Amino acid sequence: MSTRNRTRPLLAVVLAFLYPGLGHVYLREWLRALVWFFLNVTSFTLLMPADAVPETFGWSELVAAAENVTPEAALALAAITVFSMIDAYWMAKRQNTETEVEEGTTCPNCGRDVDSDLEFCHWCTERLNPESDEAEETADDSGANA
């Protein structure tokens, strides 16, 4: 039985918007989170001119620093953020799909979804894994004959 919970794709997107990689931390995709963090920090370090980084952090200093950012640097950092948001959304959707597949089993008799930890369908009472039961009985019989 899987212990993975369903994720919220929009929460992952909002976190990735706040800082690239945060959405992946929420999804527990540690390697992807590190890649997005590293990509954002490296791009910021390489693309930002020295006069765009303020000495002190206040509203007026941040506004003045934002005016000194080149359009190419702003576009590159915005693209990293957007791609991180898209990737976080895609990863959350994929995790949810995998969770649905792990959690549910289809009854071979009636075709309805049932829990995978049950031995029978609670809709039609058909055994879900008759071949595994037969294999256990065969193993028990061969052990008794030895």
Image: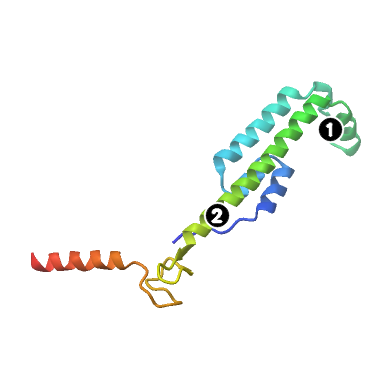
Residue 98 image position (x, y, % from top left):
51, 54
Q: Dot 1 corresponds to which residue?
A: 56
For residue 85, above or below residue 126: above
Q: Nearer the viewer, residue 14 or 113?
A: 113
What residue is rendered at 66% in x and 44% in y? Answer: 22
Three-letter residue code for mark 1 = Thr
Placement of the C terminus among the 4 image quadrants = bottom left
Three-letter residue code for mark 2 = Thr
**Residue 109 falls left or right of residue 63:** left
Residue 66 image position (x, y, % from top left):
86, 31
- Could you say which quadrant of the image residue 122 lies in? bottom left
Q: Mark 1 against mark 2, which lies toward the viewer?
A: 2
Image mark count = 2
Residue 52 image position (x, y, % from top left):
83, 26
Instruction: Give the secondary structure at mark 1.
Output: loop
Q: Dot 2 corresponds to which residue?
A: 97
What residue is rendered at 80% in x and 30% in y? Answer: 74
Residue 3 image position (x, y, % from top left):
49, 59
Q: Nearer the viewer, residue 13 or 63?
A: 13
